[in-house]
Structures are given as C-alpha cells and as structure tokens.
C-alpha cells in the first residue's frame, strides 16, 4: 500500500502524544511537555493531511466498484476481495489512522455505505448486502 509508512508514522505520533499526556500528570516541566506535544500535534496534522489528500478520489473509485455489488449477498470470499480493493484504492490499512479498526465494517461506515448483515446459519461468516450510498464523511 502506498501510504503504509505514513500511516505507521501517524500511529507512532499518536502514541507519543498519549505518552506526553500521561507524563503531564507525573512531571513538573509542563511547559516543555506542552511544547513537545504541540510540535507532535502539528507534525501529525501535516502527515494526516498528506494521508487523506486523495480520499475523495479513492472514494469515488470504490463507489464505481461497489455499485456493481448493490443488493447482492456477498460471502466471505467476496467480502475479503472488497476489503482488499478498498484498502488498495485508499492506499492504507485503516479508514482512520488513529483508530485500530481496519475491517470491512469500519471502511463501509467511514465511506457512508449503506449495508446490512445477514446471518448465515450454515457458516460462521455472515453475508453482507450493500444497499446504497449514504453521506461520505
């Protein structure tokens, strides 16, 4: 994926920022901690802007492919293929670098895709039915 390194850097910065917030509770050099945290926040924002710059284009490309899948029951194989397609189009693992979720459900929610899950009694894998397009975040 084209943005994996960028995504990992943002996740690392998020961890560092969280550590700074914890350090503030135990250390007395609050001004210095705040400066470092602010610097990290600024760096993170620049990287996030770079990471998300092509999202609208990626979203539209995904919608073209998803349009063919409307109202069809997608099993495990089709869901995994769709997840890989979405990750490939967006060039990263997760829809939001700050969150841990990177599965198909998280991507569909982020893209505002309307869908429902149908329990499949024969397998452990629920079927997915994409019903429409909502508001992209």
Image: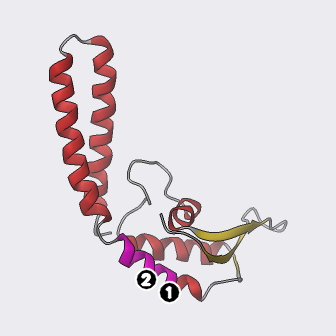
Seen in the picture, residue 117 relative to 61 is either above or below; the reply is: above
- Mark-to-mark CA distance, 1 and 2: 5 Å
Report the number of discs.
2
Residue 61: mark in rendering: 2
Locate residue 23, reporting x and y percent: 28, 20
Q: Position of residue 96 (x, y in %)?
A: 42, 55
Q: Residues within 10 Å of mark 2 (few under 14, many from 20)?
A: some
**SS assignment at label 1:** helix
Q: Residue at x 17, y 38 (%)?
A: 39
Q: Which residues are magenta?
A: 55-63
Identify the image quadrant of residue 128. bottom right
Indicate left or right for 13 with 89 as reference.
left
User: What residue lies at 28% left-to-right and 69% top-to-bottom?
Assistant: 2
Q: Residue at x 24, y 12 (%)?
A: 27
User: Whole-percent x and y of residue 70?
Assistant: 65, 83
Q: Main secondary structure of the magenta part?
A: helix
Residue nearest the viewer, comparing 19 with 39: 39
SS for dot 2: helix
């Amino acid at each position: 994926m084209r943005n994996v390194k960028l995504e990992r850097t943002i996740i690392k910065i998020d961890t560092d920022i969280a550590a700074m917030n914890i350090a503030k509770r135990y250390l007395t050099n609050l001004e210095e901690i705040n400066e470092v945290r602010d610097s990290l926040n600024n760096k993170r924002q620049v990287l996030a802007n770079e990471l998300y710059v092509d999202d609208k284009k990626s979203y539209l490309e995904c919608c073209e492919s998803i349009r063919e899948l409307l109202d069809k029951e997608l099993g495990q194989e089709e869901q995994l293929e769709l997840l890989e397609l979405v990750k490939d189009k967006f060039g990263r693992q997760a829809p939001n670098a700050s969150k841990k979720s990177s599965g198909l459900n998280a991507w569909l929610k982020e893209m505002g895709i309307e869908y429902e899950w149908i329990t499949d009694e024969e397998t452990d894998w629920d079927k997915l039915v994409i019903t429409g397009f909502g508001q992209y975040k």
